[in-house]
Image (cartoon, helix red, strand yellow):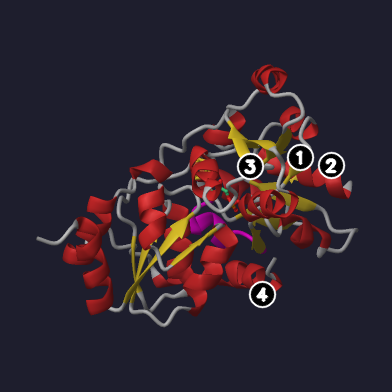
Amino acid sequence: MKTITEKILALKKEKNAVILAHYYQEEAIQDLADYVGDSLGLSQKAAETEADIIVFAGVHFMAETAKILSPNKKVFLPDLKAGCSLAESCPPDTFGEFVKNHPDHVVITYVNCSAEIKALSDIVCTSSNALKIVESIPKDKPIIFAPDKNLGKYIISKTGRDMLLWDGACVVHEAFSLDKLLKVYADNPGSKIIAHPECPPEVIKASDFAGSTSGMINYVKDNQPKKVMMVTECSMSDNIQVENPNVEFIRPCNMCPHMKKITLPKILDCLENETGEIIMDQETINKARLSVEKMVAIGR
Ligand code: 13P
Ligand code: SF4
């Protein structure tokens, strides 16, 4: 009798499929994935894979981005309800009106949004290249930045650019408070605090380092702090503990309820029965591809 992991691996081979997993996925899923990465790395892999099928262990906007970049492949999301509070905060009709009312603005959107929003954008970014992308826009050009206001505020603090921000937030990172953080720090004096830029500004300000998912991983790898508070999704500390045995990871952390909708049985169902396929109309794919490809070309 085969285990669920053995069944997934056999079907993956038989159907020439790849499993791409975000760092926020549980360890068992990361272990059988062909590639584990942050949003940018996953987009790059989706664009270059030779596989016929992509199973995306992540959330809806990530699988959609993979479909935009590889429209001739079948892309599956093991649970089509795995959404994102940032994407939900930015409905296409309201955002379309907002863009129309600011015709002179360059529209930069964080990849955590729907394909319709990407289609309304000039260029997409992820947290690991947002600074670089904002800096690539001529200084005299006004910018709309959506949907994450906290990432937007972080970029403003770093670049001094006066951007028009959309009022969206990530439920996972917005929930961290400075108060709670300081209480944990008081019990663990001297620990390094590293935070994702989706956190509130006061949390970022109190941190030793702010950076994207891969930025945070590299910080731990390169600096080997004795104790570190990773102010982000809980799977991050779990997953990088093995590679950093001398680092003590201190909570707090928050779980992303959307990322955690993905499970091994749902991945098996995708491969066995082709459930959860991402279906998009060609016009949206074509429009969104322009802004996503610009981001992939700029890279990290
Ligand atoms: P990155 O992978 O770009 O750091 O994004 C983090 C995140 O919240 C994904 O949903
Ligand atoms: Fe969206 Fe936040 Fe979950 Fe990432 S962690 S998928 S931004 S809700």
Q: Amino acid at mark 4?
A: Ala
Residue 152 placement, left or right of 257: right
6, 272: nearer the viewer: 6
Residue interval drawn in magenta: 113-122
Residue 47 placement, left or right of 18: right
92, 79: nearer the viewer: 79
Q: Residue at x 68, y 39 (%)?
A: 195
**Of label 3 and label 1, which has the lower sequence position?**
1
The relative height of residue 262 versus residue 269 in the rendered view (above or below) is above
The mark lying in front, picked from 3 and 4, is 3
Image mark for residue 297: 4
Q: Residues within 10 Å of mark 3 (few under 14, many from 20)?
A: some
Image mark for residue 247: 3
Q: Residue at x 41, y 56 (%)?
A: 30
Q: Residues within 10 Å of mark 2 (few under 14, many from 20)?
A: few
The residue at which mark 2 appears reads as 157
Instruction: Kindly report the distance in space between the C-alpha atoms of the residues bearing marks 3 and 4.
Output: 35 Å
> Dot 1: what SS?
helix
Q: x and y percent of residue 245 in the render? A: 58, 47
Instruction: Kindly report the distance in space between the C-alpha atoms of the residues bearing marks 4 and 2.
Output: 25 Å
Q: Is mark 4 within 8 Å of ligand 1?
A: no
Image mark for residue 120: none
Q: Is mark 1 within 8 Å of ligand 2?
A: no
> Dot 2: what SS?
helix
**Of label 3 and label 4, which has the lower sequence position?**
3
Q: Amino acid at mark 1?
A: Lys
**Of label 4 and label 1, which has the lower sequence position?**
1
The residue at which mark 1 appears reads as 153
